[in-house]
Amino acid sequence: MLIKNGRVIDPANGLDLTADVKIADGKIAGIGHYEPEPEEQVIDAEHMIVAPGLVDVHVHFRDPGQTHKEDITTGAASAAAGGFTTVVCMANTVPPIDSAETLSELRSREASLPIHVLNTATVSKGMKGQELTDMDALRKAGAVGFTDDGKPFMNAALTEEAMRKVSALNVPISFHEEDPCFIKSPGVNMGKVSEQIGVGGAPAIAEYSLTARDCALAINTGAKIDIQHVSSAVTVDIIRAMKTLCPTIYAEVTPQHFSLTEDIVLEKGTLARVNPPIRTEADREALIRGLQDDTIDLIVTDHAPHAREEKEKDMLHAPSGMIGLETSLALAVTNLVKTGKLTMNHVLSKMTVKPSELYGLDCGTLGIGRNADVVIFDPNEKWTVPDHFYSKSSNSPFIGMTLEGRVQATISEGKIVYLKGERK
C-alpha cells in the first residue's frame, strides 16, 4: 500500500511534512516520495493528514455481561470509524475482570478483531474496594493495567498497597476520583443547573479531594497513576502542583469536558449525564489550559454506551455516560485546533504518544518497521453528527452538532478497517 501526498504528522518522531507513506507486510516501510509499484494499492491523501492510528486508553465495550449496549465487535467498529487502532477497555463489566479466567476468555475473543483491543483488570475483587485481586495472575493473563473505574477507591491504605503492587509490575493504575460522601446525585454538576432541574448534583470537591490523596500516595510509592476524566479547575491545579513532585502522575480529559458546559444538560437532558459531570465555563477553560501546559497528558473518550430505553429514564435514574469514539477527533479539531488553543501536533501527541507511553504500548507512531496503524483524516471537512453510529448505542449529546475534521480511512496493520462512506 502507498499513501500519497498527505501531510504526515508523527509527533513521536517529530515529523510534520508532505510525503508518502509506504506500507509493506503490515509495517511502515518508508516515509518519503515514491512511485507506485505494480499492483500496489494507492490512497491519495492530498489535503489530508496522515497520522499514527489513534490510541484511546479509556473505553467501555460492555463485554461480558451488558452486550445489549455494546460488544467487542461493535466497539471495535466504532473505534475504527473514529480513527482509533488501539483501545484499552475498562474492567467494570459483568462480571468484572477480576480473575485470570474471565480475562483470558475475553482476550481469546479479542484476538480476531480488526484493531488492537486491550484490557485492564480490576484493582479489588468484585470492585468492592476491600481486597486486592491477584494482580500477578491478571498481569500474566494479559492485563495492561488496573482500575476500578466507575467506582472510587475509598480505603487509603489499600490504595497504597495497590500502588506498590502495580509499581512492582510496572503497569499503571487508574482512578475514578469521586468521593460519594460529597455527592447528592451523580451526573450533573452541583450548581445553577442542578438547582434548576431539581437534583442535588455532584460538586468538584468530590473529585479534587481524592485526586490530592492519590497524587500524594503516588509520591510516596512511585507508582504510575492516571487521574481519569478530569473535570474541575481545582483538580487541574492540584495535578499541576503534584507533578512537580512526582513524574509518574498522568491525567486525562474527555472531549465532552473540554467542549461543553453544564448548560448542555438543559438542552440534551440525560444524554449529557456523565460521571464526573460536565461543569462550568471556568472549569472548561482550566481543562484547556491543562492541556496546553501538559498538566493533562491524554485525551480519552470514556466511551460509555447505554441502550436508548435506559437513557430515556429521568435524570435521577438514567445511567451516566455517553459514547465518544466516533466524535472524539472532530471535537478536538473543532474546539482545540480550530480555536487556536492547541496545534494539531499537540492534539495528536495526546491521542497517540502519551497514551502509548502511559501503558508502555508499542503503538502511536509511524516509525519505520512499526505496525502500519494509520489514520487519514480531513481536518477541514465539516459534518453534522448523525443519530446513528457504528456503536450499538447512540447516547451522544453531540447529535445534530456541526463539527470540523473527519476520518477518511483507518488502517490497522496495513489493512483498511474503516473507509468513509462504506457502512458495516
Image (cartoon, rainbow, N blue to C red):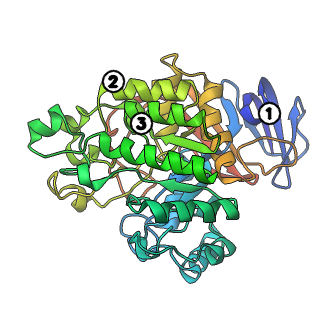
* Residue picked out by circle 2: 282
- Whether residue 36 is visible to the viewer of this picture, yes or no, is yes
How crowded pointer 1 is (Cα within 10 Å; few <14, some 14-19, many 20+) is rated as: few
Q: Is residue 207 left or right of residue 24?
A: left
Rendered view: 257 above or below 311? above
Mark 1 or mark 3, which is nearer the start of the sequence?
1
The residue depicted at 79 percent of the width and 45 percent of the height is 41
Question: To which quarter of the image does residue 312 belong?
Answer: bottom left
- Whether residue 90 is visible to the viewer of this picture, yes or no, is no
Q: Quadrant of the N terminus?
A: top right
Judge by depth and name the residue closer to the eye, 68 or 362: 362
Amino acid type, mark 2? Ala
How crowded pointer 2 is (Cα within 10 Å; few <14, some 14-19, many 20+) is rated as: few
Secondary element type, mark 3:
helix
Percent coordinates x, y for residue 64 in the rendering: 45, 74
The residue depicted at 72 percent of the width and 49 percent of the height is 363
Q: CA distance from mark 2 to mark 3?
A: 12 Å
Q: Nearer the viewer, mark 3 or mark 1?
A: 3
Amino acid type, mark 3? Thr
Percent coordinates x, y for residue 97 in the rendering: 50, 73
Q: CA distance from mark 3 to mark 1?
A: 31 Å
The residue depicted at 45 percent of the width and 48 percent of the height is 213
Percent coordinates x, y for residue 161 in the rendering: 55, 65
* Residue picked out by circle 3: 235
* Residue picked out by circle 1: 13
